[in-house]
Image: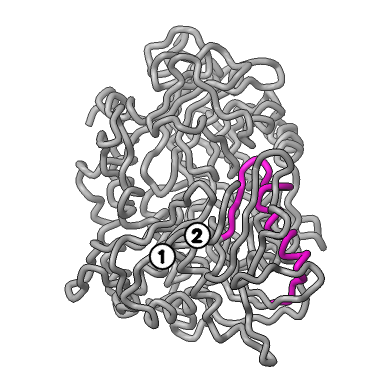
Amino acid sequence: MSRRNRRIAGAAVVGACAVALAAPALASPTQSSDSSSSNGYGNHGHSPRNVDVQILSFNDFHGNLEPPGGSSGRIQTGPLATDTTDVGGVEYLATHLAQARKGHRNTVTVAAGDIVGASPLLSAAFHDEPTVESMNKLGLDITSVGNHEFDEGYKELQRLQKGGCIDDGDGANNQNSCPDGVFGGADFKYLAANVVVKKTGKTILPSYSIKYFGNGVKIGFIGMTLKDTPNIVTASGVAGLQFNDEVATANKLVPELKRKGVNAIVVLIHQGGIPPSGTPYYYTCGGGGTLDASSPIIPIAQKLSPAIDMVISGHTHQPYVCNIPDPAGKPRLVTSASSFGRLYTETNLQYDTRRGDIVRTSVDATNLPVTRIVPKDAAQTALITKYKTLVEAIASRVLGQITTDVVKAQNAAGESPLGDLIADAQLADPSTTTGGKVPVVAFMNPGGVRADLVYNAQKYPTEQPGDVTFEEAFTVQPFNNYLVSMDLTGQQIYDVLNQQVTGLNAASSKILAVSKGFSYTYTKTGTPGVVEGSVAINGTPVDKAATYRISTNNFLSDGGDGFAAFATGTNKFFGGLDIDAFANYLESVSPYTPGALDRITLQ
C-alpha cells in the first residue's frame, strides 16, 4: 500500500486533538507540530541539509499476540456505532510496520510501555517470553517501561531484557518459562530513567538510548514510566524501588545528552491523556477539540524542557495526536496509539544536519489502523502457532458454563455483572480461611477485570456455546494475584468505600466490586462518599466499632489504586491465586446466570 493510501486509510481513526493554549487545531486528523501549511509529509522548507526521519510507535501492547476479541478488536471509523473496522493482531501489526518502513532510509520503531503484563494466556503462560520474541521479530528498537512491566518485579523485567530462564517447576501456577530450554531476551532496549534502586540510587535499566542513523543523524530517546506506578502495582513488584518525577528526570538528562552531541530528543513516557467523555473513537482535533483538562500528560508535557522535540505517550489506552506547547510556548506533538496493537503512529520529520537537531515545524504524525486486510507476517504466525500448541492443554480446559454474556461494563452506580461474579468467587474461596475465621465480604478492583465472558466465543473444536475455558477465565483475570484475608473495623470498611470517590480517586472514581450480601449507598454530590448507616452485611448495618474479616487481592491489600485503608488491615493471611478461585467457583455454580445489580446504590 502506498504511503498516501495508508494515510487516507488512517484518517478516520486518528483521534488527533489540540490542547488548550496550543496553536489552532488543524481540520485534518493528521497533525503537525506547527499550525503553518504543510503537504502532509513534513516537508516544511526542505533543503539539502535536511534529512528525512521516520518514527513508528505504539504503546500498551499487553501481550496481545492474537487479535483482541469482541469489541476490543474493533474500532469505530464513522459517525455510526456500526461503522467499525476489525483491527489488531501482531501478525498484521508486523506487516503494517514493514510496509510503512518501505522507502524510508532512516526509520526507528519505538514504544511507550506496557508491552507485557496483563497479557492473554498465550503470552502470560510463558512469563511473556513469547511477546518479547515477537517484538524482536517485529523490529522494535526501543521502549520505555510501563507499570505492568513491574507485575512480576524488576528482577523479572531485567531478565526479559537480558534473557535466561526461570526455574518455575515446569508449569507452576500455569506458567512455564523456556519451554524450549532457552530464552535469549529482548533485542530491543528497555528504558527506565525515573526508576532507581533505593539502596544504590542507580536506575534499574538505562535512562536513554541514542539511535544513530547515517549522515551524522542521531536522536536520543528518554524512557520513563509514570511516577505513580507504586500506587497501581502490587507492592512486591516495586519493593526497594523509587519512582522519580517525570519532568525532573527528563530535564536533568537533556544536558547529558547534549554533552554527547545529541540535540534531537524524544521522550517515551508511560503516562497519557484522555479525550473528552462522550467523544467517538475517531475523535479528531477539527473544530478546536481538546484533551480533557484532567489528563495527566498535560502538565508533564507543558513542563518538559524546550530542548525535547516530541513526546510519545501511553497508559490511558487512548488514540490522539496533540499539540501541547513547551515552556517556551512552541507547539510540540504528543502522541498515543490506543492499545493492544490496534493502531500505530507514523511520525515523519526532518533532521537539520547543520544544527544536529529536529526541525520542529516539520514534525508530522498520524495514527493508522492495524487492519486485517493485509497479509499475515509469516514469522509471527509461526511463533503464535508454536505457543498455541504448547499452551492448548491448559487453555482449552472447560471450567463451566454461562447462559448469557457476563460483562465488565458498570452501571451508573459502578456495579457490573462480571465484577459481582468475581467478588462472589473470592468470598467463596476457602484458601483465605485461617483459624476458623471466614471472610464475610470480598472486594475486587474494577481495573483488574480485563475482558467480558462471551456466550458465543467458541475457539476450540470441542468447545460449546456457553462454555468458559481456562483461557477465557485467565483473560478476565490475568495478573496471578494472591487472595488475602484480613481484619478491618467497620470504620475501615467505610474508609475503603469513601476512598472510591475521594483522594486519589476523586477525579476518576474507582468503584469496587463487592460480594453478595454486602450493600451500601453512596453519593458523588455535596460531600462525596458513603451514606451514613447504609453499609450492611446480609441486611445488618455495619458497626464501625466492630471487626470484620474481609477478602481481597494482594494488589488492593497493599493499598493499590488509592485504597490506603486496605493497607491498614490486620492479621493478614495469604491464600491462593485469584484465577484459581474464579475457576473453582465457576465450576461450582454452572450454568451461571448474572443476577440483579442491586448491591451498590448511587444516590
**In the image, 589: left or right of 561?**
left
Q: Which quarter of the image is occupied by the N terminus?
A: top left
Rendered view: 326 above or below 104 = above
Rendered view: 435 above or below 429 = below
| Residue interval drawn in magenta | 486-512
Rendered view: 272 above or below 603 = above
Frontmost residue, 394 versus 494: 494
Q: Amino acid at mark 2?
A: Asp
Q: Is residue 57 magenta?
A: no
Q: Amino acid at mark 1?
A: Gly
Residue at 23% x, 50% y is 376
Residue linked to disc 1? 595
Residue 177 visible from this viewpoint: no
Residue linked to disc 2? 598
Residue 267 visible from this viewpoint: yes
Q: Quadrant of residue 76?
A: top left
Residue 516 marker = none
Residue at 67% x, 48% y is 501
Identify the element where label 1 is drawn. loop
Contact flag, marks 1 and 2 (Cβ < 8 Å): yes
Where is residue 295 shown, x and y percent of the image? 61, 34
**In the image, 384: left or right of 38?**
left
Q: Quadrant of residue 210?
A: top right
Where is residue 474 shown, x and y percent of the image? 42, 69
